[in-house]
Amino acid sequence: MIGKKLTRARISLTTANKARKVLVISIESDEYSGFHQGAGEAVLADLIALDIPKYRLILIDEIETSLHPRAQRRLIRDLAEICRLQQIQIIVTTHSSYVLEELPLEARIQVLNTVNNKQVMPGISAQFAVTKMDEEAYPEVDIYVEDEEAKIRVE
């Protein structure tokens, strides 16, 4: 359903369990219930359907779980707009560079566990964060040199 325009959303009850609420969304003339959505789409729909009062603090762990990269980016943009309108704050944890790239530098903090304590690093780049979480390096810049001696000095 990524890239399609949502035209309507409503909550419905199931016949199997009267207490179970299911989100039903309409895209053009087609309707899809939560039973026909992927896990990420279902969680996303439940999150967007929440009625969050003004001036609240919301915590979301691993916000990217089961979401396509495009959906991750869109979710962060939509949540930023909800924060502005509802005057709320949202704190998320993530392992996703897609989520990090949508956030301004001042909204990014990485907490590193060291032997004796925790180190808080504000304003990190997505590449730095992913490098710290992975076995691979994701450089922020590429440096080219003319010869082996310069290469040794740079490394």
Image: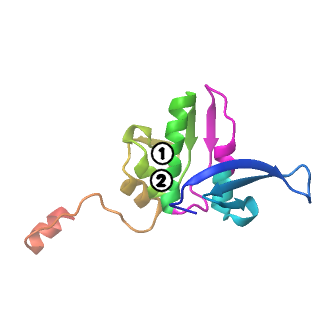
Q: Nearer the viewer, residue 25 or 38?
A: 25
Q: In front: 122, or 56?
A: 56
The stretch drawn in magenta includes residue 67: yes
For the N terminus, the image quarter is bottom right
Circle on res. 77: 1
Q: Are the residues tagged 2 and 1 within 8 Å (C-beta)? A: yes
Q: Is residue 54 above or below residue 90?
A: above
Looking at this view, is 5 or 77 the one in front? 5
Furthest toward the left, the residue is 146
Quadrant housing residue 146: bottom left
Q: Residue at x 68, y 57 (%)?
A: 42
Whether residue 85 appears in magenta in the rendering, the answer is no
Can I make out residue 62 in this image?
no
On the image, which quarter does residue 138 sit in?
Answer: bottom left
Color theme of the render? rainbow
| View extreme (top): residue | 55
Instruction: Note whether 79 is above or below 20 in the view shown.
Output: above
- Pointer 2: residues within 10 angstroms few (<14), some, or many (20+)? some
The chief SS type of the magenta part is loop
Q: Amino acid at mark 2?
A: Arg
Instruction: Tell me where residue 118 appears, x and y as whole percent.
Output: 51, 43
Residue 92 falls in which quadrant of the image?
A: top right
Decide if residue 29 is in sight here.
yes
For label 1, count other residues whose C-alpha is less than 10 Å away and answer few (under 14), some (14-19) or many (20+). some
Question: Over which residues does the magenta segment extend?
Answer: 46-68
- Determine which residue is flagged by label 2: 73
Residue at point 56%, 40% (across, down): 91
Q: Secondary structure at mark 2?
A: helix
Question: Circle 1 — which element?
Answer: helix
